């Protein structure tokens, strides 16, 4: 029985990540698969598997999660904050559940397959819209956004992860599989630009620059800071492009009520965040995750423009910044623990491009998104976490492995 479960277990994990983008269509399946993994885990895990967790970054993330729970418990906020706490636990739980699986090939392939499936499904729906809707227009149409399998932000993040996994999987010596990895990279890059996922494009630009620092060629190393200067110069000199960058895909009725200075929805949210930021004891204790959202709702309700007020209250936007969200909700200690996890993990992995690129992607995503408010965000953060742990374990045990 144990042998059978051990052979099935990795494929259950693969299927889990394959189905994540299709949550709207197979909502119960990811939860069922997690249930299967939880039940099978004690039967397939070995004592030696837990040695993979003996790493300082893991201890830091455990300390961060423990502090969130303790903070909520002390101030009686467990019921209100449980929704976010469960998302953080998902990320941590995925790492633990993956311990019996050897190597990272299966989880890496799951990301590649799921990104290809998501792209094909989204393109299929867009093609159907083109041929069935005479008024359909690319980029300016809300229907274009709704045709995508999942939110454009997370669809772009999935493509970024797929690109990184494929790039890492390309071998230096000839392999027939290399052509498929290159094809997947090209497919995802084209798709990211096709859907105009601004977050994904920005992350990819940063990663391309980052990659130059790992080049052995001194000219390419010099090229990286030069690229940074050029991009910053272009960015600061083209304010109109920046405005279009952030506002171009908001519904037309919302665009009419957004002032030119309000470059994006997030700009308005962050303005409200400044008005409700922690004061006094809240700097240490936080408001709680639900308390932070309630404070933002009160700010939205006091907006002067009726259309914008109604839109923000209806959508109940969270703070859209993971670092501010943790600071507002759990206090300064919570956000320092979270940031310490990133800083120390980056320092430990700085000599390797792949783990550094994964971490930088999550760092940048956290600037404009509170991913622990979304189950899909927790899944992809968990993927990065487990890749870092398993990959480092492989390198320590066998420095020559490329698995």
Image (cartoon, helix red, strand yellow):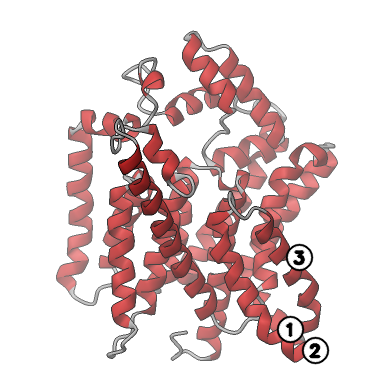
Q: Earlier in the sequence, mark 1 or mark 3?
A: 1
Q: Residue furthest front?
A: 132
User: How far from the left and from the top, in percent, is residue 120?
Assistant: 39, 59
Q: Secondary structure at mark 1?
A: helix
Residue occupying image coordinates x 72% and y 44%: 83
Residue occupying image coordinates x 63% and y 18%: 298
Q: Secondary structure at mark 2?
A: loop
Q: Which residue is mark 3?
A: 35
Q: Which residue is mark 1?
A: 5
- Tell me the tag on residue 1: 2
Query: What is the count of numbered marks?
Result: 3
User: How far from the left and from the top, in percent, is residue 249?
Assistant: 35, 33
Q: CA distance from mark 1 to mark 3?
A: 14 Å
Q: Are marks 1 and 3 in contact (CB under 8 Å)?
A: no
175 or 243, nearer to the observer: 175
User: How far from the left and from the top, in percent, is residue 148?
Assistant: 43, 46
Which quadrant of the figure has residue 134?
A: top left
The answer to whether residue 286 shows anywhere in this view is no
174 or 214, nearer to the observer: 174
Residue occupying image coordinates x 69% and y 66%: 33
Q: Are marks 1 and 2 in contact (CB under 8 Å)?
A: yes
Residue 200 drawn above or below residue 261: below
Q: CA distance from mark 2 to mark 3?
A: 18 Å
In the rendered view, does 69 fall on the left or right side of 148?
right
The answer to whether residue 65 shows anywhere in this view is yes
Residue occupying image coordinates x 30% and y 59%: 189
Residue 25 drawn above or below residue 72: below
The crowding category of the residue bearing disc 2, from other C-alpha atoms within 10 Å (few below 14, some 14 to 19, many at least 20), is few
């Amino acid at each position: 029985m144990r042998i059978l479960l051990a052979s099935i277990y990795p494929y259950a994990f693969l299927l889990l990540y394959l189905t994540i983008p299709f949550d709207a269509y197979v909502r119960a399946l990811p939860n069922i698969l997690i249930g299967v993994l939880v039940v099978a885990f004690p039967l397939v895990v070995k004592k030696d598997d837990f040695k993979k967790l003996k790493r300082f970054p893991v201890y830091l993330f455990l300390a961060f999660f423990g502090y969130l729970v303790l903070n909520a418990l002390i101030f009686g906020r467990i019921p209100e904050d449980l929704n976010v706490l469960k998302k953080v636990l998902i990320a941590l739980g995925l790492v633990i559940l993956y311990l019996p699986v050897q190597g990272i090939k299966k989880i890496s392939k799951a990301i590649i397959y799921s990104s290809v499936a998501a792209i094909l499904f989204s393109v299929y729906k867009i093609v159907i819209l083109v041929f069935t809707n005479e008024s359909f227009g690319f980029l300016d149409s809300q229907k274009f956004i709704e045709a995508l399998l999942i939110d454009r932000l997370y669809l772009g993040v999935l493509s970024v992860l797929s690109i990184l996994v494929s790039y890492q999987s390309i071998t230096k010596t000839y392999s027939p599989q290399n052509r498929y990895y290159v094809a997947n990279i090209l497919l995802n890059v084209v798709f990211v630009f096709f859907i105009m996922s601004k977050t994904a494009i920005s992350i990819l630009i940063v990663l391309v620059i980052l990659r130059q620092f790992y080049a052995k060629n001194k000219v390419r190393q010099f090229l990286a800071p030069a690229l940074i200067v050029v991009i910053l110069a272009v960015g600061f000199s083209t304010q109109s492009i920046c405005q279009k960058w952030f506002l171009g895909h908001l519904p037309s009725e919302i665009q009419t009520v957004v002032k030119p200075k309000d470059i994006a929805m997030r700009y308005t949210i962050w303005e409200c965040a400044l008005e409700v930021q922690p004061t006094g004891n809240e700097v240490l204790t936080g408001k709680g995750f639900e308390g932070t959202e309630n404070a933002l709702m009160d700010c939205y309700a006091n907006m002067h423009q009726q259309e914008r007020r109604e839109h923000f209250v209806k959508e109940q936007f969270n703070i859209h910044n993971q670092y501010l969200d943790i600071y507002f909700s759990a206090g300064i200690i919570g956000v320092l623990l979270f940031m310490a996890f990133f800083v120390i993990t980056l320092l430990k992995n700085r000599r390797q491009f792949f783990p550094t690129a994964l971490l930088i992607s999550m760092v940048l995503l956290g600037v404009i998104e509170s991913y622990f408010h979304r189950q899909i965000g927790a899944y992809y953060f968990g993927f990065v976490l487990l890749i870092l742990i398993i990959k480092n374990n492989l390198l320590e045990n066998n420095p020559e492995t490329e698995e």
